[in-house]
Image (cartoon, helix red, strand yellow):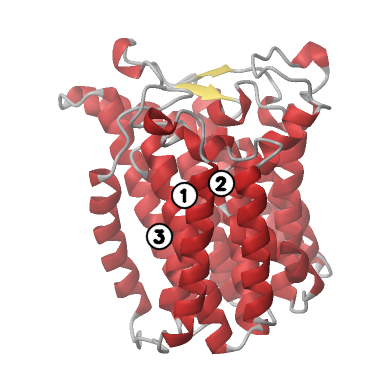
Amino acid sequence: MFRRSESRILVLVVFGALAAYDPYHVHDWVWRGVRDFTNGRVGWLFGWIAAATIAAECLGAWVPAWAPRVRRPLRWAVAIALLSVAVLYWWRVPQWMGDYHDIDRDLIPVVEIESAEPLGTILSTHVIRIGADIGILPSTAVAIESSLWGASAIAAIFLFARTISPEWPLRFAMLTLAPYVVLWCGYPEKGTPKSVALICWYVAVTTMLFRRETRTRFALSNIFLGLIGLMHGSGLCWLPAHLWYVWRGRPLRALAGVALFLLPGAVPLAYYLTGSARLIGGNWGNIAAPWQWIKKYCITNCGYDFISMPHLLDITDYLVMFVPLALLCLPETVANLKERRERWLALGALGWLFLSCAWFPVFGYIGDWDIFAGTPLVLSFLVVSVATRVMSASDFRRLALAWITICAIQTGLWWRFFYLPL
């Protein structure tokens, strides 16, 4: 996939043909966004998507180098965030699933600490209460919150793209035009929009840390990781990579990192100790989530057992929908790992893949899609990083245009899913 354009086109042809035939119904997620006029027959749709991607790959040969000079990146990041929050809220989805499905019919919530997403719950509850005080519907208040977090994430992606390459616009587009962005289109959830947004900041800051180590970057890397886990417990799958590549080898530095990692936990702890919020959701929360396939922990309506082909297909379907080219490039990406930053991202991606396979979704992957959004995001960071180093500039532009095309199409399909009856 990295070395020759012909090999990428061949893989896309085979992928498109298999997807069109689809003996295992892997296109299930794609057709949901157009189910009002396809009646489930979408082989032709995958064929057209593959054709558009191949055309974009070929047109990429004529894409000129574009490396806008950025003298003051923080000012650029602020400007991008301001523009992004307007775009994300403008494209907010009118329907959603999960925590706040009937939020406008419920009473204004009291402040609670949910063990699965303690800080995410606290922040969203305060947002809802503030919205009620100024006459805003709870769903609107949380949608604004989600869009604000998403805008900050897009600013962080810009900083990451600029760090790894002068030709940052293509990297930026590759990482922002993917279906996980729908999570920031006003999607009301307690913790996952914040947690996934903080992944972008964690990756951006830690990448800078590997480039040039400073105390500020080290502190921010650890604090962001602590915040990710507190916003939603799924973020804890980053810990092995962080332990091995950021803390390992320097005991005093590791102790300081652990203290900074635990520092954000003082907020929900203070709420609990002062009686300002009550604990709900059990004592272990998402820490025990990988063991949910044990029947006594799993009261599920997702329609399949943990060890079953439908479960495996749901995982595959999710990744094919969200980051198809990243998935196709993954084997070659792993084979070309070299730099410390790349190995750190690879171990982090392995943690997220483990989460995707081991966490049994109570409402199925469709209903719980937001929990797994970190997996395609981290895979994208990994593949883009390695491809930037391995590929020539011209070959990367061809891959980038194909990537942007297929992701933009499937982002539109997934966004449209929330405009149809759920």
Distance from disc 3 to disc 1, alpha carbons, whole Å, reads 19 Å
Q: Mark on residue 154?
A: 3
Closer to the eye: label 3 or 1? 1
Q: Which residue appears farthest toward the left when viewing the image? A: 135
Is residue 249 among the parts visible in the rendering?
Answer: yes
Give coordinates of residue 339: x percent, y percent. 74, 79
Is 210 drawn above or below residue 129 in the view shown? below
Sort mark 2 into few (<14), some (14-19) or many (20+) by Cα contacts within 10 Å.
Answer: many
Q: Which residue is mark 1?
A: 410
Disc nearer the start of the sequence (3/1): 3
User: As rendered, which of 320 and 291 lies closer to the eye?
Assistant: 320
Q: Secondary structure at mark 1?
A: helix
Q: Are marks 2 and 1 in contact (CB under 8 Å)?
A: yes
Is residue 160 among the parts visible in the rendering?
Answer: no
The answer to which quarter of the image holds residue 272 is top right
Q: Residue at x 25, y 59 (%)?
A: 82
Disc nearer the start of the sequence (2/3): 3
